[in-house]
Image (cartoon, grey):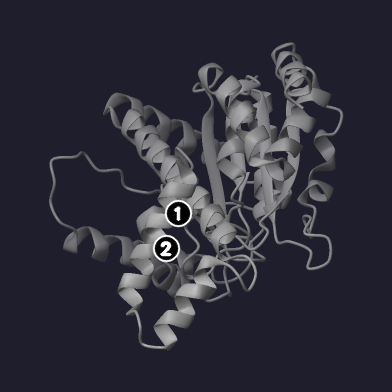
Amino acid sequence: MTPDLDALVDGLERGERRALARLLTVVEDGSPEQLRHVVAALHPRAGTARVLGISGSPGVGKSTLTDAVATQLRAAGRTVAILAVDPSSPFTGGALLGDRIRMQGHHTDAGVFIRSMASRGHLGGLSFATPQAVLVLDAAGFDDIIIETVGVGQSEVEIAATADTTVIALAPGMGDGVQAAKAGILEVADVFVINKADAGGAGRLQSELQGMLEMGHATAEVTDEPGWWPPILRTVAVKAEGITELVAALDAHTGFLASHGLGAARRRARTRHLVRELALESTRRTFARLSEGEDGLLEALAERVERRDLDPYRAADELLAASRLAAS
């Protein structure tokens, strides 16, 4: 497969959309060896794209908001790639909702590329393959990469470890003020958007968010790092209202990161997160190989623990030692 992958990488450099689509498929469905080859080839060519994350609860209009932001960025002459992370089909494992359906207005625009990815049970609102997909799109030369997450719950805020700027979308009448506090969203948002702001309750939601932000700011530990106060914006994405102000806020945050030297720190944090996740995934695969079948090492260790010949901690030590040997 390696010659084919090299041809796809060369095609990506020439701007071939077919090569881009096939490389993203390799990232999602290829073997670990194929993924290693693609990442090694593309990593030196990436590092220039701005990564924007749009997250929030189901039903707040994330897809419509993403579509409107992409339209505004294109009007400014920027190329845009969109990764829409969907829930997985329990039957095929593929993307269930297919958010591209909501973004058909861009299908003839060569400056926009849209891809749906299945979360495949990965928590955090993203897919495990999302960082590698971002790498492929970055190497393809897009100016902005927008990641739209699965509707998030109380622990699904992984987007903050992936994006340069994180937008949290909320909507009136959905209990989102309380949900934001419960989910830890206040800590990860760089920009808040109250979408569907033409509905009743938008003002109350904005007041609740403002109060929560002020309370968090008052109790936050004082550091020497300059702070960013997340703006709270109102939009009606379906009518493109407030989108100009939202894109201006995104640009302002990008400028803030650059002027305070924080952009490099965020990219370093993103790299740490990626390296850690890859190491953990490799360890999980090694454990899976050691645990397969009734004759697997894990089964043998479990039997010894059950017979009280071995305590659980020593059994875990033996499994770790075997995994190190298997990985070396």
- Dot 1 amino acid type: Ser
* Residue 240 % position (x, y): 68, 44
How many marks the image carries: the answer is 2
Mark 2 element type: helix
* Residue 238 % position (x, y): 73, 51
| For residue 60, above or below residue 106 | below
Category of crowding for the residue at label 1, using alpha-carbon neighbours closer than 10 angstroms: few (below 14), some (14–19), many (at least 20): some
Foreground pick, 113 / 76:
113
Q: Residue at x 34, y 25 (%)?
A: 258
- Dot 2 amino acid type: Leu
Q: Quadrant of the N terminus?
A: top right
As measured in the structure, the alpha-carbon distance from the residue carrying label 2 to the one carrying label 1 is 6 Å
| For residue 302, above or below residue 293 | below
Foreground pick, 220 / 267:
267
Work out whether residue 258 can be spotted.
yes
Q: Quadrant of the C terminus?
A: top left
* Residue 150 % position (x, y): 63, 59
Mark 1 element type: helix
Q: Residue at x 72, y 40 (%)?
A: 30
Say which mark, if any, is on residue 319: 2
| Lateral position of residue 80 relative to residue 208, left or right | right
